[in-house]
Image: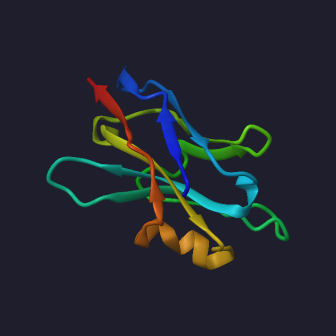
Amino acid sequence: QVHLEESGGGSVQVGGSLTLSCQHSTTPISRYCMGWFRTVPGKEREGVAVIDGDRNAPERTTYADSVKGRFTISRDNTKPTLFLQMDNLRPEDSGTYYCAAAPRVYGNLCLANLNFGMDYYGKGTPVTVSA
């Protein structure tokens, strides 16, 4: 069983920044396809960013069009922790953000999980962006 725990959510003004963190219970984190998803009341879950877990290839990431150039997904495999750096935040970025993981999924299949979701999710951390 994979346990994921998010932190770092909060309230921020438009244009501000937040860094979300996700503690992963299973090592090595580098072998997991991982990502961030978000939900907003009345809307379906949206994939925000995904990072590939294939150690045999250069690390690859993919992002939702709405966050490209503003959000950065990364990880520290030694801790193990997943991060989401969110800059230039907008009101439409408000929602609950979930860390997610998918074991034994690599390469393009991992990146495609941005649209399909993953096997494990944390409980979420709320983000509110106000004008």
* Direction from residue 112 to residue 37 in the image, left or right: left
Image label count: 0
Q: Split into 4 quadrants, where in the image is the C terminus?
A: top left
Residue at (42%, 70%) from the top-left corner?
115
Residue at (34%, 33%) from the top-left corner?
126
Q: Return the residue found at the far front.
A: 1
Q: Return the residue found at the far left.
A: 42
* Direction from residue 67 to residue 13 in the image, left or right: left
Task: Name the one closer to the observer, 19 or 104.
Answer: 104
Is residue 51 visible to the viewer in this orientation of the structure?
Answer: no
Q: Position of residue 70 (x, y in %)?
A: 52, 42
* Direction from residue 68 to residue 13 in the image, left or right: left
Q: Position of residue 89 (x, y in %)?
A: 41, 33
Residue at (60%, 71%) from the top-left corner?
110
Q: Split into 4 quadrants, where in the image is the N terminus?
A: bottom right
Task: Name the one closer to the observer, 51 or 26.
Answer: 26
| In the depicted structure, whether residue 10 falls above or below residue 107 | above
Is residue 113 visible to the viewer in this orientation of the structure?
Answer: yes
Q: How is the image coloured?
A: rainbow
Task: Name the one closer to the observer, 4 or 85.
Answer: 4
Q: Return the residue found at the far bottom.
A: 109
Task: Name the one closer to the observer, 47 or 129.
Answer: 47
Q: Position of residue 65 (x, y in %)?
A: 44, 59
| In the depicted structure, whether residue 71 falls above or below residue 100 | above
